[in-house]
Amino acid sequence: MKTIFESNMGMLGKVLDLHMERQNVVMSNLANLDVPSYKAHRLNFEKELQSALGDDDRGKLTRTEPGHLPTVFNAASFNGDITMKWKPRVVAGLDSVNMEKEMSIMAKNTLMYNALSDVVKKDFSDLQRVITDGGNK
């Protein structure tokens, strides 16, 4: 179906949603920092995203034709994978949630979300410019 948006807009929207979901998972881990039996959760989607886009493990794209990229991304069929990691406690009263690690994951996730938001904002700014100015510079 032909749209006014670039073909990557669906992918960007889905990845933004997954980054927001990851932020919620990290916040849940931090909220349960002092709960003795709580196990830290993780949302991992990068490897699944690479395979959905046709990337290999080294991050190189494979081309099926010299003039285009490999496949069309289907945002509706792509989801992240929530996992629980648990390590036995070494000291009584401490659980498996490490505040420093959670904060670093949150900071990295925020940077990625903001970068993707800037890309989407630029796409909409370009569209707005075309609508208001007719594409004239």
Image: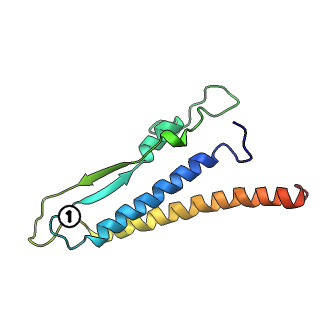
Residue 59 shows up from this direction:
no
Residue at x-position 58% and y-position 58%: 116
Q: Residue at x 47, y 37 (%)?
A: 51
Residue at 41 percent across and 66 percent down: it is 106
Secondary structure at badge 1 equals loop
Which residue occupies the foreground of this view, 85 or 57?
Answer: 85
Report which quarter residue 32 is drawn in.
Answer: bottom left
Residue 108: % across, % down: 45, 63
- The quadrant of the image that shows the C terminus is bottom right
Amino acid type, callout 1: Tyr
The residue labelled by disc 1 is: 38
Relative image position of residue 112 (x, y in whole percent): 51, 60
| 137 sits to left or right of 75 | right
Image side of residue 6 versus residue 80, left or right:
right
Q: Position of residue 100 (x, y in %)?
A: 31, 71
Residue sitting farthest toward the left: 92
